[in-house]
């Protein structure tokens, strides 16, 4: 069985309505929205790491 020691999360847009008890370790942009609003991210030119 695999034992996880640490989990880190990265998000492009952190929506600040806080429905889920998950903290983003790394964020690109923080935006206050309602639960009914949607956020669309369209990646442009840049450096993308995999």
Image (cartoon, rainbow, N blue to C red):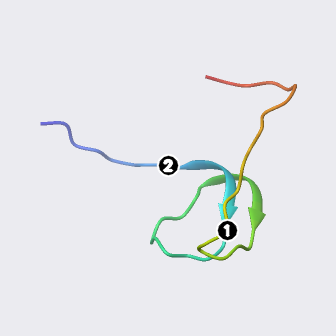
Determine the CA span between mark 2 and mark 1: 26 Å
Query: Mark 2: few, some, or many residues within 10 Å (few <14, many ≥20)?
Result: few
Numbered disc 2: secondary structure? loop
Which residue corresponds to the image point at 74% horizontal and 74% vertical from the top-left?
32
Task: Name the quadrant containing residue 25.
Answer: bottom right
Mark 2 — residue? 8
Residue reaching furthest to the left: 1
> x, y (%) of residue 24?
58, 58
Numbered disc 1: secondary structure? loop
Question: Do the residues under discs 2 and 1 have CB atoms within 8 angstroms?
Answer: no
Sequence-first tag of 2 and 1 = 2
Reply above or below: 29 against 15. Answer: above
> x, y (%) of residue 48?
73, 25
Residue reaching furthest to the front: 36
Task: Name the quadrant containing residue 29.
Answer: bottom right
Which residue corresponds to the image point at 66% horizontal and 77% vertical from the top-left?
34
Mark 1 — residue? 37
In this picture, residue 22 sits left or right of residue 37: left
Which residue corresponds to the image point at 75% horizontal and 63% vertical from the top-left?
30
Reply above or below: 42 against 14. Answer: above
Q: State the quadrant of the N terminus.
A: top left
Query: Mark 1: few, some, or many residues within 10 Å (few <14, many ≥20)?
Result: few
Q: Nearer the viewer, residue 16 or 27?
A: 16
> x, y (%) of residue 41?
74, 44
Q: Nearer the viewer, residue 8 or 30?
A: 30
Task: Name the quadrant containing residue 31.
Answer: bottom right
Reply above or below: 44 against 25. Answer: above
- Closer to the observer: label 2 or label 1? 1
> x, y (%) of residue 50?
61, 22
């Amino acid at each position: 069985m695999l034992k996880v020691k640490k989990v880190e999360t990265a998000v492009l847009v952190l929506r600040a309505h806080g429905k889920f008890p998950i903290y983003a370790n790394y964020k690109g942009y923080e935006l206050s929205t309602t639960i009914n609003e949607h956020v669309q991210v369209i990646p442009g030119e840049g450096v993308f790491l995999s």
